[in-house]
Image (cartoon, rainbow, N blue to C red):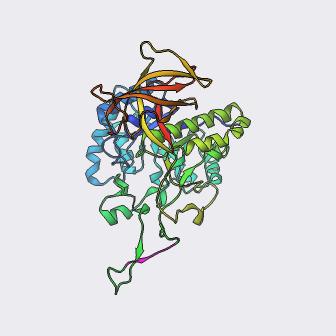
């Protein structure tokens, strides 16, 4: 018997990735304000941007969860009280706030009594007794620790109230430290991971030194490139969704508030299609596995694994030969407008139906006139297109768009006239 359809929860590190999440199938998004979030280096949202974003997301039927999951120090609590009051007084309030620290939990309840509180994975939620404790305090959802197996999550589901929701990560980077509680960054750089300023030293290359020979670095070698002893594989469960669903997980969470819109669009669209396909027909899901795996890799990522869901991954969960990301597609930009130019009509070339579309976009990576690109549609279709003309911000015709973050106008010749590019669609170049 198929369980209820889980929520697909996407990261919104800033307004641009929020747009991608809304366009490509999120049921809910999580975002941080300028304070109290564990992704202080993300673009994040001002209070005004957050209020506007909540209204826009709600208009599309998408929920918004705000992260306030730092491990607070004394100096944080007074400002946190004002922050929770501000959230509770927004024209449309967030659907939940994500908290890890018990002091922040009480501060939220005191200053925003109606808040729905979700307990972050940072709180080390690894057994049903912990979940029941938080339920008695008034929490509505637990984000389970990434150290749990699916068997353990099923046991939690069987031993907590029906209306206590379980959220679990389904995709994205894995932290080397227990439930993300890491001291390495603070020790090495003075930037505290538990307060949102992680510098990711787990991805660095290390050497060994001997105390009587300072300055003499001896490599730790697994290969000619060295050994990256702290670097873990990225999590990807697109090929195991039935197991996630049947474990009783209510919300499937994608990591990535530091990622770009191509990552958010690619991951959101692939998991959206896979979830919907499975609930339409398990056979349809099985038949499209190859497509899911191909599309989920059309971004920048480290080698994939299944984390702890099937037991301790041991050595297989680590990356030993480098920290280089794989990249199968490059983010070119998100369309701000798309329309058929005046006097233009459909045409044909070598049996293909073609349409010229005038688009504008903020360029993110270079591409040139005559180059083949793809335009991602939310339903899973990838439109093939070629830039036939390009104009810079002053209206001068140019043969390429070489300058990042500049507004570009272009004429794209798109194959297939039944479906056309629209504002919000993401452009990519496959590599």
Compared with 63, 39 (above or below) is below
Residue at 51% of width from left, 21% of height from top?
355
Compared with 337, 135 (above or below) is below
The quarter of the rendered structure image containing the N terminus is top right
Taking the magenta stretch, the answer to whether it contains residue 416 is no
* Foreground pick, 367 / 116: 367
* Numbered marks: total: 0
Choose top left, top right, bottom left or bottom right for residue 308: bottom right
What percent of the width, then of the height, locates residue 314? 59, 65
Q: Residue furthest top?
A: 343
Choose top left, top right, bottom left or bottom right for residue 292: top right
- 343 lies left or right of 376: left
Residue at 55% of width from left, 35% of height from top?
269
Magenta highlight range? 217-221
- 222 lies left or right of 394: right
Choose top left, top right, bottom left or bottom right for residue 336: top left
What percent of the width, then of the height, locates residue 274? 62, 37
What percent of the width, then of the height, locates residue 282? 72, 37
* Foreground pick, 122 / 265: 265
Magenta stretch secondary structure, dominant: loop
* Residue 138 showing in the rendered view: no
Q: Residue furthest bottom?
A: 212
* Residue 402 showing in the rendered view: yes
- 199 lies left or right of 312: left
What percent of the width, then of the height, locates residue 311? 63, 59
Compared with 358, 278 (above or below) is below
* Foreground pick, 181 / 338: 338
């Amino acid at each position: 018997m198929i369980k209820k359809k889980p929520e697909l929860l996407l990261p919104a590190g800033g307004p641009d990735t929020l747009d991608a999440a809304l366009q490509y199938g999120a049921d809910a998004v999580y975002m941080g304000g300028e304070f109290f979030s564990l992704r202080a280096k993300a673009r994040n949202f001002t209070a005004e941007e957050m209020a506007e974003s909540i209204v826009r997301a709600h208009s599309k039927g998408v929920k918004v969860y705000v992260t306030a999951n730092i491990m607070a120090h004394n100096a944080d609590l007074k400002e946190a009280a004002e922050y929770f009051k501000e959230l509770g007084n927004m024209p449309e309030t967030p659907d939940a706030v994500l908290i890890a620290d018990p002091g922040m939990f009480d501060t939220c309840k005191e200053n925003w009594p109606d808040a729905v509180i979700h307990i972050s994975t940072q709180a080390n939620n690894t057994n049903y007794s912990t979940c029941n404790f938080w339920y008695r305090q008034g929490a509505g959802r637990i984000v389970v620790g990434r150290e749990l197996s699916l068997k353990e999550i099923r046991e939690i589901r069987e031993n907590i109230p029906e209306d206590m929701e379980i959220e679990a990560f389904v995709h994205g980077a894995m932290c080397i430290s227990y439930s993300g509680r890491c001291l390495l960054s603070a020790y090495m750089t003075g930037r505290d991971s538990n307060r949102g300023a992680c510098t990711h030293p787990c991805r660095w290359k290390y050497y060994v030194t001997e105390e009587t020979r300072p300055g003499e670095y001896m490599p730790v070698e697994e290969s000619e490139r060295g050994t990256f002893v702290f670097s873990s594989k990225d999590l990807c469960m697109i090929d195991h969704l039935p197991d996630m669903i049947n474990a009783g997980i209510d919300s499937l969470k994608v990591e990535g508030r530091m990622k770009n819109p191509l990552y958010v669009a690619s991951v959101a669209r692939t998991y959206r299609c896979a979830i919907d396909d499975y609930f339409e027909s398990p056979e349809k899901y099985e038949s499209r596995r190859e497509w899911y795996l191909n599309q989920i890799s059309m971004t920048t990522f480290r080698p994939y694994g299944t984390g702890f869901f099937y037991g301790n991954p041991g050595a297989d969960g680590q990356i030993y030969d480098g920290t280089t990301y794989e990249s199968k597609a490059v983010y070119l930009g998100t369309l701000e407008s798309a329309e058929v130019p005046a006097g233009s009509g459909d045409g044909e070339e070598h049996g293909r139906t073609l349409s010229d579309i005038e688009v504008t976009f903020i360029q993110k990576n270079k591409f040139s006139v005559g180059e083949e690109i793809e335009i991602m549609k939310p339903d899973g279709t990838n439109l093939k297109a070629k830039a036939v003309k390009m104009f810079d911000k002053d209206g001068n015709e140019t043969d390429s768009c070489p300058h990042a973050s500049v507004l570009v106008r272009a004429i794209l010749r798109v194959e297939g006239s039944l479906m056309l590019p629209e504002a919000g669609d993401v452009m990519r170049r496959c590599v």
